[in-house]
Amino acid sequence: MADAVATQTILDGPKYAVLKFTNVSDGSGESAVTKVDVSGLSTGADGSTCTGVTIQKIWWQCTGMKVSILFDATSDVLAIQLGENQSGHHDYTSFGGLPNNAGSGVTGDVQFTTVGHSSGDTYTIILYLRKEF
């Protein structure tokens, strides 16, 4: 069996994307699962392909587990960890957002890893992303 997960695209425009992610855990959890595949996002106004994203805002709620948001690379880089039994709204726009600072083997993708998950734990995460080309 696997966690019951869903992804909803709320907006996928030429500059920004807004994606919603949910998980109801069966106890198996997620480990570096690609949630934002930048190659699957729409192109820029000039037809250029998205090569990465900067996290502008996060709305989230975690019940019973933490979620690590990672920038995918040869050695994944932690963007932020969202706390167990907490919720919040983080707005990083005043300083330009959380850029992908992954090094060697960077793909531009964003991954999630659940931490301390057990059956019945949940998360809902909404990411407001600025596309990079």
Image: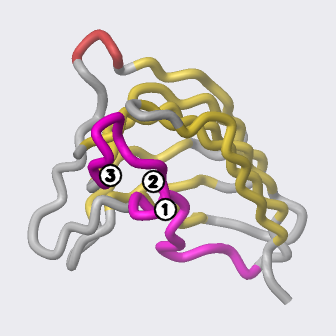
Residue position marked by numbered label 1 in the rendering: 40
C-beta proximity under 8 Å, tags 2 and 1: no
Above or below: residue 24 compared with residue 17: below
Residues in magenta? 28-49
Image location (x, y in percent) of residue 112: 52, 62
Image location (x, y in percent) of residue 106: 20, 67
C-beta proximity under 8 Å, tags 3 and 2: no
| Amino acid type, callout 1 | Gly
Above or below: residue 107 compared with residue 31: above
Residue position marked by numbered label 3 in the rendering: 50
| Amino acid type, callout 3 | Cys
Q: Is residue 48 left or right of residue 11?
A: left
* Residue drawn at (61%, 34%) of the image: 11
Residue at disc 3, secondary structure: loop
* Residue drawn at (45%, 53%) of the image: 69
Which quarter of the image is occupied by the N terminus? bottom right
* Residue drawn at (37%, 33%) of the image: 130
C-beta proximity under 8 Å, tags 3 and 1: no
As drawn, the label of residue 69 is 2
